[in-house]
Amino acid sequence: MLTRLSTHLAIGFLKFLAILPYGLVARFGDGLGWLLYQIPSRRKRVVHINLRLCFPQWDAARRNEVAGQHFRHVIRSYVERSVQWFGSAAKLEKLVQIESEIDLLDPDMPPTLLLGAHFVGIEAGSIFINYALQRQCGALYQPISNPLLDKVAIEARGRFGSHMASRADSARIVLRWLRDRKPVMLGADMDYGKRNSMFVSFFGVPACTLTATGRLARTGNAQVVPFIGEVLPGYKGYRLKVFKPWENYPSGDDYADARRMNEWLEAEIPHIPEQYYWVHKRFKTRPEGEKGFY
C-alpha cells in the first residue's frame, strides 16, 4: 500500500517521465517488465493460468513466450501512464494513429456506447478517443483504492472534456448522458463478480460476464461501438482502432448479447495475444460448487 509520501513521489516521477522522449520511456518500461518477469509472483502465475485455460493447444514454450511479452507490456503500460496522463495533446497526436470505421466527428452521431476492450493500450485509446471526438464524453471508471492516486487518475482521464463516473454509480448517469447524445466509454470484459453478470463462454471457459452493456444499449436506444488501443511495435506509439457498430445489437437476450462481446474478443485477441490483459483474474468468480483456478 503506497503511503501519501510515496504516492506523491510516484506521481512526481510520472510527471518527470512525461517530459522525456516517448521512446526512452517505453524502453525503460519494457526493460523493467522483462526484469520483473524473471521474479516469481502471483501475477505471473495468473498470466500462465489464463493462457493455459484459453489456449490449451499451445505448448509450454509458446505460453512462456507470450506470458513474458505480456508482462513486459503490462509494466510498460504503467510506466507510460506518464505520457498518457501528463503528456501534451500535441505529443499524444504524434503518438496515436487512428483507424476508424465510423466518422468520429459526425455531428449527428446517435447515442453511442464506446466499448473499450482491455488490451494494454486501453488507457491511451480511451484518453485519445475522447480527444478525437472533440466533444464532451462520459466515461465509467473503476475507483483506485489509493484516494490521492484516484484523484489524479480522474483528472488525467478527464482532461479532454470527459465526465467521469464511478462504475458503482453508473446506470442513471449513463442513461442521462445517452439522452444528451454524449458518447459514453465503458469496459465490460472483466470479472466484476456475480452482480449484473452471468456465466458465458470465453475461449471455452465459463466466465462471469457483465450484461450491463446490452441492457444500457437497449434502454438508452444506443449503438455499441467497440474500440481497441493497440501498442505499435518498435516503440512507435499506439493505434486506436474503432470498429463499426455491432449490427442487431442489443438482441434483447442478455446471454446472447454477453456472448456477442466474448465472441468478438475471441476473434480479436489472437491478432495480438500478448497485449490482452491476462494479469487480470478473468475466471476468479466460478459457478456454484466449481473449484477456483487461482
Image (cartoon, rainbow, N blue to C red):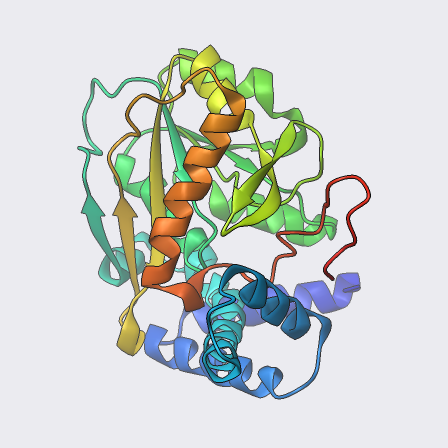
The answer to which of 215 and 84 lies nearer the viewer is: 215
Q: Position of residue 180 (x, y in %)?
A: 39, 13
The answer to which of 107 and 278 lies nearer the viewer is: 278
Q: Is residue 126 visible?
A: no
Q: How many marks?
A: 0
The answer to which of 45 and 228 lies nearer the viewer is: 45
Q: Residue furthest front?
A: 57
Q: Position of residue 183 (x, y in %)?
A: 37, 26
Q: Position of residue 144 (x, y in %)?
A: 68, 49
Q: Position of residue 21 (x, y in %)?
A: 34, 76
Relative to 19, residue 118 above or below = above
The answer to which of 261 and 15 lies nearer the viewer is: 261
Relative to 203, residue 170 above or below = above
- Left or right: residue 126 compared with residue 171: left
- Left or right: residue 120 compared with residue 242: right
Q: Residue at x 21, y 17 (%)?
A: 108
Relative to 190, residue 258 above or below = above
Q: Residue at x 56, y 28 (%)?
A: 211
Q: Residue at x 33, y 42 (%)?
A: 129
**Residue 198 falls in image quadrant:** top right
Q: Residue at x 38, y 81 (%)?
A: 24
